[in-house]
Image: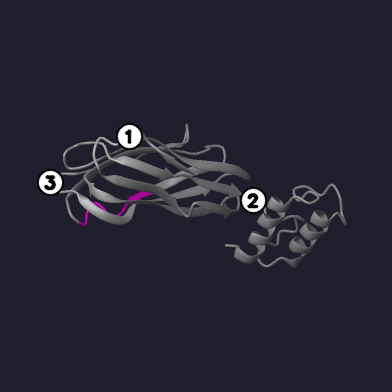
Amino acid sequence: MILSLMPALSGFDSILSISPESVITQPDAKFTIQINISGSDIYGVQFDIYFNQTILGAVSVTEENFLKQNCATYSIPHINNTVGKIKFAETCTGETGVSGSGILYNITFKTKSAGSSTLDFDNVKILNTELQQIYVSFINGTVDVVDCDVNHDGILIRDYSDLIGAYKCFLGIERNCNPINYQDWNLMKREYNCFIEFF
């Protein structure tokens, strides 16, 4: 989902995004996302990311080199897993900003239980060297935590039994076989992704 803030106070544009935009993973697994930025004369950034704290827990935040490439920086990320929020603020401490694109932060999460969570930007402010707010578009993310073990046999890696069982449920050969319901393509696709991508 692409969102944008209020009209610019300057002529500069910026894009803030989460990569990958969509994550599919297992319960009790770790994964890492990137916070990317692009724009001109970027001097300071501030934003929050909200997530579903019953599905995910933030483990660590690592500052990357986008702003550091051209200036000394001061950064204060803060994780609050009680409410499902990570707060970010980073600024240059010299006289020049940074133009181009790159990675601001890497964030590692650990999944708690099956379900879905959005990763939503909020309270976004990006400033230039004149301390004017830059117009910014931002791209949120999603995380689907899926129990890939459809038949609950404890086998996850390349489990043909799970995949065949899911197809039977999808086609209606077998009925009432949660979580793959009759002709539920989204859930069928998730099981296929479990089969080809597990982890």
- Is any part of residue 192 visible from this angle? yes
- Left or right: residue 50 versus residue 174 is left
Residue type of the residue flagged with mark 3: Gly
Q: Residues within 10 Å of mark 3 (few under 14, many from 20)?
A: few
Q: Is residue 166 above or below residue 135?
A: below
Magenta region, residue range: 61-69
- Is any part of residue 90 visible from this angle? no
Q: Residue at x 70, y 51 (%)?
A: 187
- Magenta stretch, overall SS: loop
Report how far apart the C-alphas of labels 3 and 1 lie in the structure. Answer: 27 Å
Q: Which residue is mark 3?
A: 94
Residue 107 spot, x, y in % from top left:
41, 49
Q: Decide whether residue 127 is among the magenta residues.
A: no
Judging depth in this view, the residue of 125 and 24 nearest the camera is: 125
Frontmost of labels 3 and 2 is 3
Report how far apart the C-alphas of labels 2 and 1 lie in the structure. Answer: 39 Å
CB under 8 Å between callouts 3 and 2? Answer: no
- Left or right: residue 39 versus residue 178 is left
Report how far apart the C-alphas of labels 3 and 2 lie in the structure. Answer: 46 Å
Between discs 3 and 2, the one toward the N terminus: 3
Residue 83 spot, x, y in % from top left:
47, 32
Q: Residues within 10 Å of mark 1 (few under 14, many from 20)?
A: few
- Left or right: residue 173 versus residue 23 is right
Residue furthest out toward the left: 95
Q: Secondary structure at mark 1?
A: loop
Q: Which residue is mark 1?
A: 7
Q: Which residue is mark 2?
A: 146
Residue type of the residue flagged with mark 1: Pro
Frontmost of labels 3 and 1 is 1
Between discs 3 and 1, the one toward the N terminus: 1
Q: How many marks?
A: 3
